[in-house]
Image (cartoon, rainbow, N blue to C red):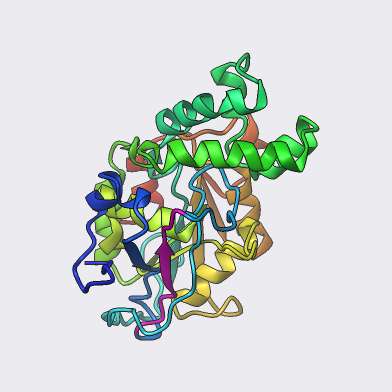
């Protein structure tokens, strides 16, 4: 299991859902996985949930971290090591991918219902209840700071007030209001069984992404989880991708990798590093958004994605 309580007991994903986040006596420890490359290379994170109102962290809409998360040493569990091989696929000359990176929201999970509900619950803090669901959907992708401060001209105080209200709802259950897109779970299982490293590359903070994958029963398929951090590092997709490649025990200088996602940021992040990009159309992109950035491949179903990756 991927978490331990302070008393040594195992923390289940359901513990968080059933109220763990509301009680200062508990902590959840999670690992950003590192099955490939260096043994136990996952970063150790601890979610310290208190009632004292510590400083709030990253304001990303798709899974803001809990209050008071602190770096803890020596709490990671040993992770098995997978050995990757350098080879090329024999069919059609398509290069074998050392690392397959994939986005979370809009690519693996449909998290719109929970996010929209929590946004709407928090809107009174800004007196913006008039916004439609279509308008709120545009809040997915860019950091909340950009949306509120730049697009709507709100103040830092407005931002802080809204973030606190949103978190109360999101971590009170909204985080787990998602479904998995058809065919994606089986696809991830097959990638995990291959000799390619599977890495999550998400704008979601690592702690939240790990909890969602655990709840979905998908965490064990991944070699590494790369996301945002509390110190505001890796707030752009190229940085998240670079961290994921390193976490998989590879180097950007000699890796053969593919990035899969539903938004233009995923495609542009891949292009930044000169790697293959695959856009999926079942996510949250606006009409024409993916086409405008010219991904190497554009797929409409998990079956088409499977063919691109040459999975049997």
Q: Which residue is drawn at 20% across and 66% down?
A: 10
Left or right, 215 with reference to 86: left
Looking at the picture, how far across and down is residue 151, in whole percent? 77, 32
Q: Can residue 24 be seen in this view?
A: yes
Looking at the picture, how far across and down is residue 153, in whole percent? 80, 32
44 in the magenta segment: yes
Q: Is residue 256 visible?
A: no
Q: How many marks?
A: 0
Looking at the picture, how far across and down is residue 80, in whole percent? 26, 80
Which corner quadrant holds the N terminus?
bottom left
Q: Which residue is drawn at 58% across and 69% down?
A: 242
Residue furthest to the front in view is: 52
Name the residue nearer the viewer: 70 or 40: 70
Q: Residue at x 48, y 64 (%)?
A: 69
20 in the magenta segment: no
Q: In which quarter of the image is residue 25?
A: bottom left
Residue 219 lies, with reference to residue 151, above or below; the image says below
Which corner quadrant holds the C terminus?
bottom left
The range drawn in magenta is 40-51
Name the residue nearer the viewer: 202 or 258: 202
Name the residue nearer the viewer: 303 or 29: 29
Q: In which quarter of the image is residue 302?
A: top left
Left or right, 204 with reference to 307: right
Residue furthest to the top in view is: 130
Looking at the picture, how far across and down is residue 8, in whole percent? 21, 74
Q: Residue at x 38, y 40 (%)?
A: 172
């Amino acid at each position: 299991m991927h978490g331990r309580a302070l008393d040594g007991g195992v923390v289940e994903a359901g513990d968080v859902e059933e109220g763990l986040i509301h009680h200062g006596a508990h902590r959840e420890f999670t690992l950003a996985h590192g099955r490939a490359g260096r043994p136990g290379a996952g970063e150790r994170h601890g979610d310290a949930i208190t009632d004292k109102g510590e400083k709030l962290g990253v304001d990303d809409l798709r899974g803001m971290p809990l209050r008071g998360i602190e770096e803890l040493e020596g709490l990671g569990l040993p992770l098995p090591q997978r050995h990757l091989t350098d080879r090329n696929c024999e069919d059609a000359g398509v290069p074998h991918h050392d690392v397959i990176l994939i986005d979370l929201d809009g690519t693996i999970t449909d998290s719109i219902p929970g996010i929209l509900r929590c946004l709407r619950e928090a809107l009174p803090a800004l007196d913006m209840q008039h916004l439609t669901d279509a308008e709120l959907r545009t809040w997915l992708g860019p950091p909340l700071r950009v949306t509120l401060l730049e697009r709507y001209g709100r103040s830092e105080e407005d931002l802080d007030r809204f973030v606190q209200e949103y978190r109360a709802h999101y971590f009170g259950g909204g985080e787990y209001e998602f479904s998995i897109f058809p065919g994606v779970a089986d696809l991830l299982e097959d990638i995990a069984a291959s000799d390619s490293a599977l890495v999550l590359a998400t704008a979601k903070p690592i702690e939240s992404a790990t909890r969602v994958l655990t709840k979905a029963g998908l965490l064990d398929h991944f070699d590494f989880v790369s996301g945002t951090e509390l110190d505001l590092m890796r707030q752009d997709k190229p940085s998240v991708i670079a961290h994921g490649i390193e976490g998989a025990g590879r180097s950007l200088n000699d890796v053969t990798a593919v990035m899969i996602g539903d938004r233009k940021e995923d495609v542009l992040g891949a292009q930044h590093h000169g790697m293959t990009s695959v856009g999926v159309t079942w996510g949250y992109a606006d009409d024409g958004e993916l086409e405008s950035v010219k991904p190497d491949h554009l797929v409409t179903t998990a079956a088409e994605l499977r063919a691109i990756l040459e999975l049997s």
